[in-house]
Image (cartoon, helix red, strand yellow):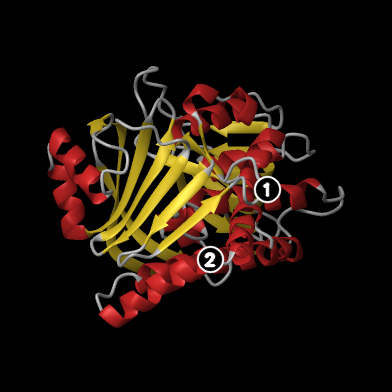
């Protein structure tokens, strides 16, 4: 079976790329090992939560996905309060920046299921699920992908959307430069005693970076980027002990906490590649890059990868082939600036707040306070984080 492109991985980035090509002439294969887990009921919440920027909400709206989500399970972020480890403070306000909201907080599963349903209805998509890649080779005319289930596909373009441990990237011989943070992201959801009023909180602490993201119904989602020993300790705590520990770490900003989901942890690392493209190959999402979660932009980078690549491919004249290197290099150039900027900014902030040196602590907290007193600079940073442009 021959396709114009074969997308390996139907996570958020891969599925949104396929959905972005719904009106194109391209014939698309999507290979995924299993469909998303079904919803577990109105009272259950995903522990994995994403902060989706307004530019990516617009992208999801253009796909027809955003309007079909259950908006009672989505929370707008109107303000953000950031606290340093020695009295530094920085705040962002959507109102002061002339915006409706800074971000929207959405469950991973909610997004995944709606994107999956979208591509299953798509006329130019053939789903191979379960589909497990077994062998991949590149010939002069096309790439050939053999699945463990017995099918053999050929495609003008292979898109690796199979995550940070990308099998496709490995088969292509693309080296991933990995810098472990020796930290884990500990996630859990809580119900809080005091209203959060659509505010996201972040504390740069001596024991990691703690974030509280607002959820509907007076709940929050926690992401604690913690050193490995602390991460292991947090995941072993009883629900009540975890609530007390997290509330105390956040200076009781929202009063007492009650558990909604158990704590889970995932390792944190910086992942870079020299180039996300080769002839007849493109990497998107976590297969191309990962960043520290302190900015909440990991999934936003993946959505923008999908948007840019979808627009390039959809606009191709009939005589151009999607796997041409000149086309794929345009995608790589378009994504280079934002990816590099966010990777090095988050990496730098993580390194800046790690050392316990008192002189460095004074300088970094002074920097937070100085930025907070310069509204033009502060609002410019917000606009870039939201739109990818100053």
Place of residue 83 in the rendered image (x, y in percent of width and height, measured from the top left): 37, 58
Q: Quadrant of the C terminus?
A: bottom right
Checking the image for residue 272, the label placed there is none
Q: Earlier in the sequence, mark 2 or mark 1?
A: 1
The residues bearing labels 2 and 1 have C-alpha atoms spaced at a distance of 18 Å
* Residue at 24% across, 30% down: 258
**Mark 1 Cα shell of 10 Å, populated few (<14), some (14-19), many (≥20):** few
Examine the rendering and report whether any part of residue 163 can be seen: no
Secondary element under disc 2, as helix, strand or loop, is loop
Q: Position of residue 77 (x, y in %)?
A: 51, 41
Disc sitting over residue 373 in the figure: 2
Image vertical order of residue 90 relative to residue 201, above or below: below
Query: On the rendered image, what quadrant is the N terminus found in?
Result: top right
Circle 1 residue? 98
Q: Which type of secondary structure does the marked residue at label 1 adopt?
A: loop
Instruction: Residue at 78%, 53% (x, y): give it.
Output: 321
């Amino acid at each position: 079976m021959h396709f114009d492109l074969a997308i390996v991985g139907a996570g958020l980035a891969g599925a949104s790329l396929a959905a972005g090509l719904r009106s194109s002439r391209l014939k698309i294969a999507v290979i995924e090992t299993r469909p998303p887990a079904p919803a577990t009921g109105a009272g259950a919440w995903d522990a994995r939560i994403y902060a989706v920027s307004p530019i990516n909400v617009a992208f999801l709206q253009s796909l027809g996905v955003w309007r079909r989500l259950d908006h009672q399970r989505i929370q707008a972020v109107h303000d953000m309060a950031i606290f340093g480890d020695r009295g530094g403070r920085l705040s962002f306000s959507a109102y002061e920046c002339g915006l409706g909201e800074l971000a929207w907080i959405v469950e991973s599963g909610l997004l995944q299921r709606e994107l999956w349903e979208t591509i299953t209805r798509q006329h130019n998509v053939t789903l191979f699920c379960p589909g497990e890649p077994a062998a991949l080779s590149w010939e002069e005319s096309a790439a050939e992908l053999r699945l463990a289930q017995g099918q053999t596909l050929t495609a003008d373009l292979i898109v690796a959307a199979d995550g940070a441990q990308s099998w496709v990237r490995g088969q292509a011989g693309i080296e991933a430069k990995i810098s472990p943070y020796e930290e884990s992201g500990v996630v859990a959801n809580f119900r809080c005693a005091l209203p959060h009023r659509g505010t996201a909180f972040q504390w740069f602490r001596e024991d990691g970076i703690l974030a509280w993201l607002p959820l509907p119904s007076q709940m929050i989602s926690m992401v604690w980027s913690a050193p490995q020993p602390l991460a292991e300790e947090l995941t072993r705590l009883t629900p009540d002990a975890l609530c007390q520990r997290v509330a105390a770490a956040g200076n009781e900003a929202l009063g007492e906490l009650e558990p909604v989901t158990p704590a889970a942890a995932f390792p944190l690392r910086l992942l870079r590649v020299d180039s996300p493209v080769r002839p007849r190959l493109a990497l998107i999402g976590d297969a191309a890059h990962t960043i520290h979660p302190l900015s909440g932009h990991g999934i936003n980078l993946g959505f923008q990868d999908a948007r840019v690549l979808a627009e390039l491919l959809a606009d191709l004249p009939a005589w151009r082939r999607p796997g041409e290197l000149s086309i794929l290099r345009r995608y790589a150039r378009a994504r280079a600036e934002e990816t590099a900027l966010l990777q090095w900014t988050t990496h730098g902030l993580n390194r800046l707040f790690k050392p316990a040196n008192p002189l460095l602590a004074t300088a970094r907290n002074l920097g937070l306070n100085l930025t907070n007193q310069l509204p033009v600079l502060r609002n410019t940073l917000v606009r870039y984080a939201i739109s990818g442009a100053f």
